[in-house]
Amino acid sequence: MNGSVANDQGSTPRERGAKTRVFVIGPYMTDRAAAYADGAKSLRSQEARLDEAEGLALAIDVEIVGREIALLSQIRPATYLGKGKVEDFAAKVKELEADLVVVDCALSPVQQRNLEKEFGAKVIDRTGLILEIFGERARTREGALQVELAHLTYQKSRLVRSWTHLERQRGGFGFLGGPGETQIETDRRLIQERMSRIELDLEKVKKTRGLHRKSRRDVPFPVVALVGYTNAGKSTLFNLLTKAEVFAKDLLFATLDPTLRVVKLPHGGKIILSDTVGFISDLPHMLVSAFRATLEEVLEADVVLHVRDIAHEDAEAQGADVADILGELGVDPHDPNRLLEVWNKIDLLPVEERERLKTSAALRPEGERPGAVSAVSGEGLGELLLAIEARLARGRVLLSVPIEASDGEGQAWLHSHTEVLARQAGEDGAAQFEIRVSPEHRDRVLRRFPEARLHGAE
């Protein structure tokens, strides 16, 4: 969107280059109505939900000119909002000269079109807004294709003479439709053709990605994946751990494509660290499916670091949302052998609260203690790396491997295919290597070095 929403004539209401003026509406059910409909009360306050909606809008570089909560006792089929609310908001949209209205809910195509007529402005719902952000943030070819496919799926039911640009994209000349074919039929066919091509392209990209994954599995280093609610500070922590310069800004969905780097642990072992897309509440299911490929690093990771913004007022609700999505992906969010919580942004807490938090973490069972860190100051980073090391050691095998001084090839093989933890040289030049490998790599090492012994074995 690039901060500018075009109208039907292809120009913006104000001069080109001006930011799109946005009015944000949070249409939320009253606690009583929500409890009646769902049997549960939202963990988030309505104000916090509106804050998040505003944050989503700001992620596409717009100007917020107004925001308001609309409490609903029921949802109206035609406009989602009641008639009185629609009239009030229409007046405010006109008064504020808003070009775009963001409605923090899932609107049906009919509701969206009716609100646009009433407001005299473009209307976008939560799903459409998240798609806009994904479209701007995706950097890899696979990410871009996944976004476009999700966007086309979303737009397929919302056809309003806005897809003729697809003809230009595909090199058409505007005469693809047969005699009597309506614009909607043309649009629908163009969308379906484009979706079919994207699906074919995705299959090719996925095959390439599968080969890359296989080559990574052959590397001895375990994979550690960062997950968490969007804006929890994952990319900042990733940058700190890897000294990399991954895009890290105070924006929702700052990272959409997984980034991989090798990180050295305190005792010499190495890991492959993966940064992934941030999760968010009410993420449309089609987007979870579309971005499953970018979350494959999580599915295959040896350890998953759940990074939480512990200073956020909705930290508990955000943690619950991440746990729900991990569950959808087939990852047990409560597996103590695989999941490690990271309480980030402790630097934002008052000193007393920070100390209380650290004490609370220390009182948990040793294998379930979260790491309390600040990705900005680096506080707690050493302890976190040790915790990662300890978590990885649980499922891996320790071996002692004697190697003759003349066997330079064997030494190089160990460094390439295992985690070398220590090397002790003997008087004759031979060396004793202490290594760690995953269980599935153990037999490979024993075949290569028959003299190797498991720790604890005679």
Image (spheres, rainbow, N blue to C red):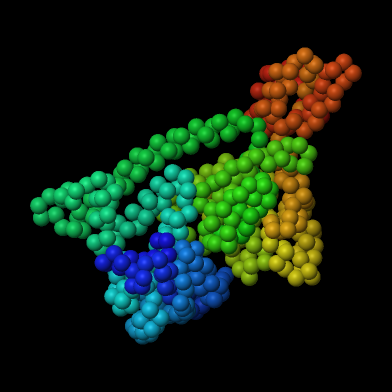
Task: Give the position of the N terminus as an image quadrant.
Answer: bottom left
| Residue 191: image location, x then y, percent | 28, 51
Task: Give the position of the C terminus as an image quadrant.
Answer: top right
Horizontally, residue 451 falls left or right of residue 48, namely right
| Residue 432: image location, x then y, percent | 82, 23
Q: Is residue 456 visible?
A: yes
Residue in the image at 27% along x and 57% along y: 163
| Residue 204: image location, x then y, percent | 40, 36
Residue in the image at 27% along x and 52% along y: 166
Nearer to me, 259 or 108:
259
The residue positioned farthest toward the right in the image shown: 427
Nearer to me, 407 or 359:
407
The residue positioned farthest toward the left in the image shown: 179
Q: Is residue 66 above or below residue 277?
A: below
Residue in the image at 50% along x and 70% along y: 54
Q: Is residue 40 visible?
A: no
The residue positioned farthest toward the top in the image shown: 406
Q: Is residue 125 above or below residue 263?
A: below
Q: Quadrant of residue 111?
A: bottom left
Horizontally, residue 414 falls left or right of residue 82, namely right
Q: Quadrant of residue 171?
A: top left
Q: How many marks?
A: 0
Nearer to me, 340 or 91:
91
Horizontally, residue 297 falls left or right of residue 240, namely left
| Residue 153: image location, x then y, percent | 34, 54
Residue in the image at 79% along x and 29% along y: 434
